[in-house]
Amino acid sequence: MKRGKKYQDSVKKIDRAQQYGPADAIKAVCDAAHANFDETVEAHIRLGVDGRHADQQVRGAVVLPNGTGKKVRVLVFCKEGPKETEAKEAGADYVGGQELVQKIQNENWFDFDVVVATPDMMGVVGRLGRVLGPKGLMPNPKSGTVTMDIAKAVKEIKAGKVEYRLDKSNIIHATFGKVSFGPEKLTENYKALIGAIIKAKPATAKGQYIRSLVLSSTMGPGVKVAPVRADE
């Protein structure tokens, strides 16, 4: 792929052969960001697990101390009554039940970023598995999006909660802020994210847990980070 001049100039600022410490890597990512918008900062973490086995799946969520820098639209599936009121008061953007299921099915409506559901609604929400699953939007107890504590779930998401999960290549792709946050706040978010992933290490995982770690901004080059051990 042919890259533009700005990207080529950004690459020159980074030693592609070096593995940086986290703080230095984040500073390098910020220095190399060149787009005319506030780029998102991403972590790409290859784990020493085999996601084909259920007992080696790595999935969860963490509230970043400085948020994500994004406005997150939350859809809540719950029954009418107290839970509906709770969701709205907590700041949910959309709250409903069967009518929202039909809206998604019939209108291909996806004006939301995160879906939360009470356990008693999962029978209804389950019908959307084929459309929500591939988009990573299906509620899941492990990520705290299937819960009776709707208020807590919505408030955490709005405050900067991010989900992480393995892809088919055993890599986690997760965002942890914006370039405009600056290195200090991004480093705090990074430590929270990596700490959560390390805590989520499956008991059956053998050998080195974090195999490789690369940070980048939306349009910038990748910066290699020296992998941390799960017991560090």
Image (spheres, rainbow, N blue to C red):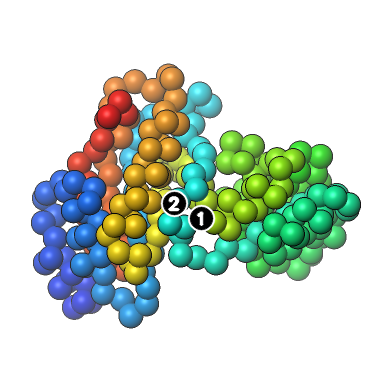
Q: Does residue 67 appear left or right of residue 5 in this picture?
A: right
Distance from the alpha carbon under mark 1 to that under mark 2:
7 Å
Residue shown at 18% from the left, 69% from the top:
10
The secondary element bearing badge 2 is classed as loop
The secondary element bearing badge 1 is classed as loop
Residue wearing tag 1: 160
Tell me the kind of residue under disc 1: Gly
Residue wearing tag 2: 65
| Number of marks present in the image shown | 2
Up-down relation of residue 31 to residue 61 (above or below):
below
Q: Does residue 228 appear left or right of residue 128 in this picture?
A: left
Tell me the kind of residue under disc 2: Pro
Q: Residue most toward the right?
A: 81
**Residue 168, image x and y in percent?**
45, 41
Kindly indicate the quadrant of the structure image that contains residue 232: top left
Residue shown at 59% from the left, 36% from the top:
142
Q: Residues within 10 Å of mark 2 (few under 14, many from 20)?
A: some
Q: Nearer the viewer, mark 1 or mark 2?
A: 2
Observer-nearest of 4 and 11: 11
**Residue 84, image x and y in percent?**
82, 54
Circles 1 and 2: CB distance less than 8 Å? Answer: yes
Observer-nearest of 3 and 190: 190
**Residue 18, image x and y in percent?**
11, 49
**Residue 225, image x and y in percent?**
22, 46
Does the image show residue 180? yes
Q: Mark 1 or 2 closer to N-term?
A: 2
Q: Does residue 79 appear left or right of residue 39 in this picture?
A: right
Which mark identifies residue 180?
none
Does the image show residue 52? no
Residue shown at 65% from the left, 53% from the top:
154
